Amino acid sequence: MTDIFTASNGVEIEISEDGYLLGKGDYGSGPTYATAGPEGIDTLREYFQHERDVELGRWRDPENPHMVAYPSTAEATGKTIIRVVNERDGSGDAYTNKSIAIRLGGSKEPNGHDCTAFSYFAAHPEPKPWEDARLNELWVLTIHGEERAASVGWRSIGGDIDGLYFTTAHEEYARSDQRIETARKVWPVDE
């Protein structure tokens, strides 16, 4: 391996003996020079890796940076499916939120793929159906094990609209309220 890397635009990159990145080249608009110290090099590596991850639509596990997840949506169910890949050896496995819960609840010791899948779903929770409730719909919410009828309407605070809320006989709940255990829409009835 050479000490100098030549990028596709002709700029040459070299790491000096004292750990500095030195870049130089001339590709038409005049000379180009770049320099970075050892800390800057690590920062740039991380930044460009993140930029590439976003471009490719993958999520990198912060605890295990060699593990990445590629999310997609199953056409039949609309649920998220991820493919977890170990970049060191190319091994991989596919998961849904339900399958990882079953695997981690079993007697088998979780592997690195399992842990990354769990971390991905923890960082990207599936939206609950009631979080998309619309104005004037009627729902039955389960809160603390008790069912409560609720309508969906605008909530106003001091004359400013605060958003759509579930309103029961005694209380209001944001559509994303964590106290809502389950909910089912009762009107209008979906076809």
Image (tube, rainbow, N blue to C red):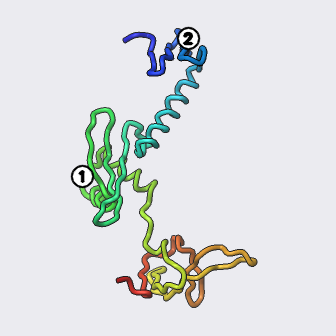
Quadrant occupied by the N terminus: top left
Residue that carries the numbered disc 1 in the rendered image: 108
Q: Amino acid at mark 2?
A: Asp
Left or right of residue 176, residue 82 in this image: left
Does the image show residue 33? no
Where is residue 68? Give x, y as percent. 37, 42
Residue 67: which quarter of the image?
top left
> In screen coordinates, is 106 left or right of 130?
left
Q: How far from the left and from the top, in percent, is residue 34?
A: 59, 19
Q: Residue furthest left?
A: 108
Q: Amino acid at mark 1?
A: Lys
CA separation in Å, label 2 and label 1 = 48 Å
- The residue under label 2 is 18
Q: Which mark is residue 176?
A: none
Residue 178 visible in the shown view: yes
Is 94 left or right of 122, judged from the image as shown? left
Question: How crowded is the residue under tag 2: few (<14 C-alpha within 10 Å), some, or many (20+)?
Answer: few
Q: Earlier in the sequence, mark 2 or mark 1?
A: 2
Q: Where's the C terminus, which quadrant? A: bottom left
Mark 2 or 1, closer to the camera: 2
Vertical placement of 131 versus 18: above or below?
below
User: Which image quadrant for residue 91?
Assistant: top left
- Picture coordinates of residue 16, whole percent (x, y): 53, 10
Q: Residue furthest bottom?
A: 169
